[in-house]
Every structure is written in structure tokens, then in C-alpha cells.
Image (cartoon, rainbow, N blue to C red):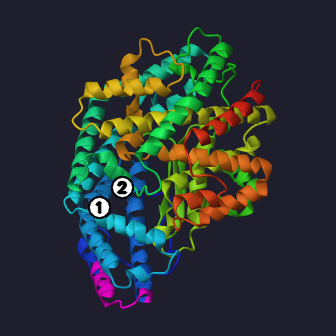
């Protein structure tokens, strides 16, 4: 598509099953590939035949998913483009619904095949577990509902990406307003914060309406699959075999017990350093000693160049991967009107190459974001030689270990963006951000547990639950006079709208990343090699084994969280004067 920053990339391996030229807009051109896969699995006699069939199926899935990713990337890069929107929605509305029943039929044929149980162990253990789970959950009537979910989510992104305000004589996106929250002048910060919050509040009724539609659709999806609520369905559909809702509640308790007290200590210190009577929402991003904002770069090209230098120092293999992405134009990093909010890494399944999307405006958090998304990209590159397509995508809980570890490992060389004093300040800012993010993750996850276990709740009940949960994990911020804004604060968290229950993964992964970093402080080479070795496993092993390969524990109760919170407290005390 012409709206993509990169062009057509060649497949990592030459196509042997999928035609070189295929019209992905035409279901009648795609359908014969499913017919061929049907015929081949019916003709397969042995486990070896099945393995060959799986390679053909993987090639087709990778090509199909790359086409889907290309359309999503174009749409999110240009939410104001009718061409990109039409191409994305055509795929969502016309192609996806046709493929899902056929994909289910193939998986059903696979798990019933006489050779299925003879697929070698442990090579196929995770694959077989996932395939059986997909077959168990699939319901034909949910295909249209999943399409509706994606369409409403696209409208949320379109609305969010369109929001601008006239701030001090210039039209700005809400992301661009973020830079003013780091300004030492408190009046400027408050004005920018209120401008952004008020603009979102204008759309509050529409955001609530969109979310109501999503909750209704998701509840029906769960009911169709035989679940009493969407939470239990979501855990099953996300393949959460190694933890359950009770474990998430233990995480919430651990954060409340070990992290929130540290957050409140940091808030008290910030209030004292700023010399203010109470800490307000617009006081959370400014330097606590009221220094001018860190300015790591002025252009995206500078950010890319300095990031490259970080990776050059960290590891030659990782550095080569980042350079390849830049050379192939697999980076869209600047903020602009009409671009969806947030940041992500998407893998082009057939080329086996990562693409990074973000909205950089020259802030320290942009540096953290590029390191984070690069970690995801390195994960994708580490699995390029894996030909079984489902194994090239690790569980999200470990994908985020890849990204969050890179924030910390790459952060050791953040002097490429700053002088020594600024680099030390940036590291402290990052660690403070980890503390606040763990509390926010617990907030978002607990809120989603509340939402989806109480079908039929009213807006008033939902708002009251949000306020209660936010207060539980929210530190010591003074929201007086801002209650209407606080009530709808969750509207800004796109995961709640687009990816239900995809947020606790960040918390679980952050615990893993802190352990990887702690290991690196003792033996950097061993920790980095373990990290890379774990990335290369992709999805071929269960979560606890992936964590173990990276040198960390898959466990998130008080017993794990408290020592890590104490480590952060100690590091932050060492940096108290920075």
C-alpha cells in the first residue's frame, strides 16, 4: 500500500505453497489455499506428513497475517485516510470472517488426525496445547461479533487520533501537549493538562458509548462459548495456562502492599522538592527539582542515530538488527495529526521483520519507548529461523520481558542522549516511572476484572468502581475540583478499549525485566546472553521455562514483588540528589 513507509518486502523464505501473486482483496482468490490445505491434511498418513503440512500452513498464515499487519499499519499511521480505512475495514469485514471458520476446520482436522498425538515431544507440546484450546473455544457465531469488536475499536482509534486543541495559538495533538507537562512553570503545566483533559471530556459520552458496545459484544462472545463472564473467557482465549484470575488478584495485593507505599514516598518527596501544598496531576511529569525538561533530541533522525549508538555499545547483533530496520524504513516514529496514539511493534509475518510505530515529540519517555519497542523488534528478529509460524510469537507476558528488559539494559548507555548529570537524572526518572507504572497496571487490570464480572452494570456503577480502584493504587495526588476528569481517566488507556485484559502482562513482565536487570548488574555478559537465548525460544516453551531461560522467576506474589520494590527503593535513595 502506498501509505506505508516501507515497500513490498521479500519473504524470508521463498514461497512454496502460496502463489507469488495473490489478490488479498478477493476471498475467491484466497479460498483455494484453504481447499488445498484441507486436501493435504486429509491425505496425510503419518506424523512426518503432518509436519510437512504444518510448514505449508505456516507459510500461508504468515503471508495472510503480513497482509493484515500492513493494512493495520497503514490505517494507524493515517487514521484520516479514507483509502487506508477502507482497505483495513475491507479485510476486517470481508476477508477475516471468511477465514476464521476455515482456520477452525483445519485445526479441528489437525487435532483429530491419527498422527497428531505422534508429533514429537517436547517440540510440539506448546503448539498442541494451543491448537486444542483454539478448537475448544471456536464458535461460528462469534466470527461476526469479533468483526464488530474490531470495527468499534477502529472507531475509537480514529476518534482518539483526531483530537487536537488550540494551545497558545497553535493547533496541537494531545500527545504534543505532553511536552508542556515537563515545564517548570506550574501555570503552563496546568493549562496544558486541563486543555488535554477537557478535550477528552468533550468526547466522554462517545467514548462511553463505544465502550458499552464493546462490553456488550464481548459478553455475547463469552456466552456463546459457554462462559458466565468475559473475564473467564478472555483468560482461556489468551492461552493463560500458567496463571489465573486469583494470581492476578495476588499481583494486585502485592502492588498495594509493596509498591504503593514506595509510590507515596516518591510523591511526598516530589511535593517537598516542588514546594507545593498538594501534589496535583500536572505535577507528576515535571522534574521534582523544577529543572527544565530533559531534551534528549530535537528530531526523530537524532533519536534514531543516538538509539543506534546505544545498541552498538550493548551488543553487535542487536545493533545490526536495528540498523536493518532503519535501512528498510521499518520505523514510523514522529507524531503528527491523523496518526493513531500510542506506540507498538508489529511483525511482518512473511518477511519476518519488525516494524515500530510511535509518536515521538522530544521527551525522555520517547527514549524509553524506542528502547521498549526495539526490545520487541529484537524478539521478532531472534525467531526468524523458526519455520513453525505459531512459535515465532511468544506469549505477551514474555514479549514484554523482551521490551522492558531492553529499557533497563539500554538505559545503561543513555549517555548517548545526555551529559553525565542528565543521564543519571534520566535513569532516576525511568525507575520512578516503573514504580508508578506498576501501580497503574494494577489499577487497569483490577478495573477490567470488575467490568467483565459484572455484566449489565451502569455508567454510574462503572465510574464509582473506577474511582475506588484508582484511589487504592493512586498514590498521593490531589484531585479536588477535578472529579469529573478523574472519573473518566480510563478513557485514555487504549488497551481497555482495544485489547481487553491485555495489561497485566506488563506487570508480570516488569517483574521479569527487573530480575534480568538485577542479574546484569552482577554479570552483564551472562545476563545479556540469557536474555537473547530466551528470546530465540519464541513460543516453543511454556511461560515458566521462558522466564527461567532469561534467568528470572515466573511468580508475582508479595514474595517476589517486595524484594524488587526494596531494590528500587534502594536505587532511588542512591539517586536522591539527582
Which image quarter: residue 157?
A: top left
Q: Decide: marks 2, 1 in contact (CB < 8 A)?
A: yes
Q: Element type at marker 2?
A: helix
User: Can I make out residue 350 in this image?
Assistant: no
Q: Which residue has dot 1 on it?
A: 137
Looking at the rendering, in which quadrant would you find the N terminus?
A: bottom left
Q: Does 429 sit above or below residue 367?
A: above
Residue extending farthest top: 277
229 magenta-colored:
no
Q: Does 191 sit above or below residue 146?
A: above
Q: Which residue has dot 2 on it?
A: 236
Residue displayed at 28% across by 68% down = 99
Relative depth, front residue between 404 and 295: 404
- First of labels 2, 1 by sequence position: 1
Looking at the rendering, in which quadrant would you find the C terminus?
A: top right
46 magenta-colored:
yes
Using residue 221 as the reference point, say whether residue 420 is left or right of it.
Answer: right
User: Can I make out residue 367 in this image?
Assistant: yes
Relative depth, front residue between 409 and 556: 556
Q: Position of residue 67 (x, y in %)?
A: 39, 65
Between the residue at mark 2 and the residue at mark 1, the CA separation in whole angstroms equals 8 Å
Mark number displayed over residue 108: none
How many numbered badges does the structure rendering display? Answer: 2
Residue displayed at 35% across by 56% down = 237
Residues shaded magenta: 33-48
Relative depth, front residue between 45 and 334: 45
Q: Element type at marker 1?
A: helix
Relative depth, front residue between 9 and 397: 397
Amino acid at each position: 500500500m502506498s501509505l506505508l513507509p516501507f515497500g513490498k518486502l521479500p519473504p524470508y523464505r521463498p514461497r512454496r505453497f502460496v502463489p507469488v501473486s495473490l489478490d488479498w482483496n478477493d476471498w475467491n482468490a484466497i479460498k483455494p489455499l484453504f481447499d488445498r490445505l484441507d486436501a493435504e491434511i486429509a491425505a496425510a498418513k503419518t506424523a512426518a506428513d503432518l509436519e510437512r503440512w504444518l510448514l505449508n500452513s505456516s507459510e500461508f498464515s504468515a503471508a495472510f497475517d503480513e497482509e493484515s499487519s500492513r493494512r493495520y499499519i497503514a490505517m494507524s499511521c493515517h487514521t484520516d485516510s479514507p483509502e487506508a480505512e477502507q482497505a483495513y475495514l475491507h479485510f476486517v469485514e470481508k476477508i477475516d470472517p471468511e477465514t476464521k471458520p476455515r482456520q477452525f476446520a483445519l485445526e479441528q482436522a489437525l487435532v483429530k488426525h491419527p498422527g497428531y498425538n505422534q508429533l514429537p515431544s517436547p517440540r510440539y507440546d506448546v503448539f498442541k496445547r494451543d491448537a486444542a484450546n483454539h478448537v475448544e473455544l471456536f464458535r461460528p457465531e462469534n466470527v461476526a461479533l469479533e468483526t464488530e469488536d474490531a470495527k468499534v475499536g477502529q472507531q475509537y482509534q480514529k476518534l482518539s487520533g483526531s483530537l487536537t486543541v488550540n494551545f497558545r495559538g497553535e493547533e496541537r495533538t494531545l500527545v504534543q501537549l505532553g511536552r508542556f507537562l515537563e515545564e517548570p512553570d506550574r501555570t503552563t503545566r496546568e493549562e496544558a493538562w486541563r486543555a488535554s483533559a477537557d478535550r477528552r471530556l468533550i468526547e466522554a459520552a462517545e467514548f462511553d458509548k463505544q465502550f458499552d458496545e464493546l462490553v456488550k459484544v464481548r459478553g455475547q462472545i463469552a456466552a456463546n462459548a459457554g462462559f458466565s463472564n468475559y473475564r473467564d473467557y478472555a483468560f482461556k482465549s489468551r492461552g493463560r495456562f500458567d496463571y489465573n484470575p486469583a494470581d492476578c488478584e495476588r499481583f494486585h495485593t502485592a502492588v498495594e502492599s509493596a509498591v504503593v507505599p514506595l509510590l507515596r514516598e516518591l510523591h511526598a518527596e516530589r511535593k517537598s522538592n516542588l514546594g507545593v501544598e498538594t501534589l496535583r496531576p500536572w505535577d507528576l511529569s515535571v522534574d521534582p527539582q523544577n529543572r527544565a525538561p530533559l531534551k534528549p533530541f530535537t528530531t526523530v533522525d537524532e533519536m534514531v542515530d543516538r538509539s543506534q549508538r546505544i545498541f552498538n555499545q550493548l551488543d553487535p547483533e542487536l545493533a545490526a538488527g536495528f540498523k536493518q530496520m532503519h535501512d528498510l524504513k521499518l520505523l514510523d516514529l514522529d507524531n503528527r495529526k491523523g496518526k493513531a496514539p500510542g506506540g507498538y511493534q508489529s511483525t511482518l509475518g512473511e518477511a519476518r521483520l519488525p516494524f515500530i510505530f510511535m509518536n515521538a515529540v522530544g521527551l525522555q519517555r520517547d527514549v524509553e519507548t524506542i528502547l521498549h519497542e526495539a526490545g520487541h523488534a529484537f524478539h521478532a528478529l531472534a525467531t526468524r529461523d523458526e519455520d513453525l509460524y505459531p512459535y515465532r510469537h511468544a506469549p505477551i507476558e514474555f514479549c514484554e520481558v523482551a521490551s522492558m528488559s531492553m529499557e533497563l539494559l539500554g538505559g545503561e548507555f543513555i549517555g548517548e542522549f545526555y551529559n553525565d548529570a542528565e543521564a543519571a537524572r534520566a535513569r532516576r526518572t525511568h525507575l520512578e516511572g516503573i514504580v508508578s507504572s506498576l501501580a497503574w497496571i494494577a489499577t487497569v487490570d483490577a478495573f477490567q476484572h470488575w467490568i467483565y464480572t459484572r455484566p449489565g452494570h451502569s455508567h454510574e456503577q462503572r465510574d464509582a468502581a473506577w474511582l475506588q480502584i484508582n484511589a487504592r493504587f493512586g498514590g498521593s495526588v490531589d484531585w479536588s475540583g477535578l472529579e469529573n476528569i478523574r472519573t473518566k481517566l480510563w478513557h485514555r488507556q487504549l488497551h481497555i478499549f482495544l485489547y481487553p485484559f491485555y495489561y497485566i502482562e506488563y506487570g508480570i513482565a516488569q517483574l521479569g525485566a527487573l530480575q534480568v536487570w538485577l542479574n546484569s548488574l552482577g554479570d552483564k555478559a551472562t545476563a545479556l546472553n540469557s536474555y537473547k537465548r530466551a528470546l530465540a525460544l519464541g513460543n516453543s516453551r511454556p511461560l515458566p521455562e521462558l522466564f527461567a531461560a532469561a534467568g528470572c522467576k515466573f511468580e508475582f506474589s508479595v514474595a517476589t514483588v517486595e524484594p524488587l520494590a526494596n531494590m528500587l527503593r534502594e536505587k532511588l535513595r542512591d539517586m536522591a540528589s539527582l
